[in-house]
Amino acid sequence: MEFRMTAITAKDNPSIQLYRKLVRQRKARTQNQQFVLEGYRLVTDAVHFSRKLTHLFLTEAAWERYQEEFCSLEADLRETKRLLISNELAMELTETEHPQGVFAICQMPAEQVPIVAEGTYLVLYQLQDPGNMGAIMRTALAFGFKNAVVTTGCADVYSRKVIRSSMTACVKMNIYKTDDLPG
């Protein structure tokens, strides 16, 4: 199977503008029900855990390095807009000094299953520091937690800092958002 990509170079490309908007604005993430991922492991883990990618951005160097892996994901990326970007555009999208050249826009899970009595849940109540939130999620996943309940007043679970500090826990766990915890 051929892995087709469209090359883009303009900073004002609508896909690039959407990525930037999702990085900067929690409101945009909520309205679009999308969030951004950066790095090979985050992007491929999202695919392996059945998260839908709407956009995949790769630099030429990243394509050369990870071509075999992305070709093996072709079936999972059929409906994904695949874009080849320049190193200059990659530097516009990243916060790191040496990016891997792999970026994606991911769809938030559509439906949240109601919380049930059985099972183990991590409950994050008014946790506002994104770095701490991601670290707690990462630790909980290591201890076997598959579900996290996030209350109003918490940091945005889909912010770039939470995603990065969770080290893929945010795409491996079921996230339940609630305004009200049962007593």
Image (cartoon, rainbow, N blue to C red):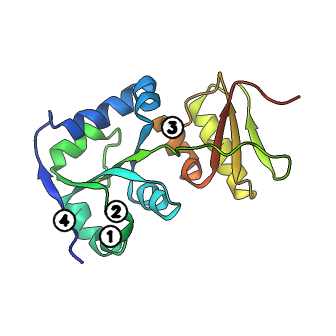
Q: Position of residue 76 (x, y in %)?
A: 39, 65
Say whether marks 3 and 2 touch (CB < 8 Å): no
Residue at (73%, 28%) from the top-left corner? 125
Q: Secondary structure at mark 1?
A: helix
Q: Kindly report the distance in space between the C-alpha atoms of the residues bearing marks 1 and 4.
A: 10 Å
Residue at (37%, 27%) from the top-left corner? 24
Q: Position of residue 171 (x, y in %)?
A: 54, 51
Q: Which residue is mark 3?
A: 158
Q: Which residue is mark 4?
A: 4
Q: Is residue 102 left or right of residue 2?
A: right
Q: Secondary structure at mark 2?
A: helix
**Which is more N-terminal, label 4 or label 1?**
4
Say whether marks 2 and 4 touch (CB < 8 Å): no
Pointer 2 local density, CA inside 10 Å: few below 14, some 14–19, many at least 20: some
Q: Secondary structure at mark 4?
A: loop
**Which marked residue is nearer to the observer: mark 3 or mark 4?**
4
| Residue type at the position of mark 4 | Arg
Q: Is residue 124 left or right of residue 31?
A: right
Q: Residue furthest right?
A: 183
| Residue type at the position of mark 3 | Tyr
Q: Kindly report the distance in space between the C-alpha atoms of the residues bearing marks 3 and 1.
A: 25 Å
**Which is more N-terminal, label 2 or label 3?**
2
**Which is more N-terminal, label 4 or label 2?**
4
Say whether marks 1 and 2 touch (CB < 8 Å): yes
Q: Kindly report the distance in space between the C-alpha atoms of the residues bearing marks 1 and 2.
A: 5 Å
Q: Kindly report the distance in space between the C-alpha atoms of the residues bearing marks 2 and 4.
A: 11 Å
Q: Secondary structure at mark 3?
A: loop
**Which marked residue is nearer to the observer: mark 3 or mark 1?**
1
Q: Which residue is mark 1?
A: 74
| Residue type at the position of mark 1 | Glu
Say whether marks 3 and 4 touch (CB < 8 Å): no
Pointer 4 local density, CA inside 10 Å: few below 14, some 14–19, many at least 20: few
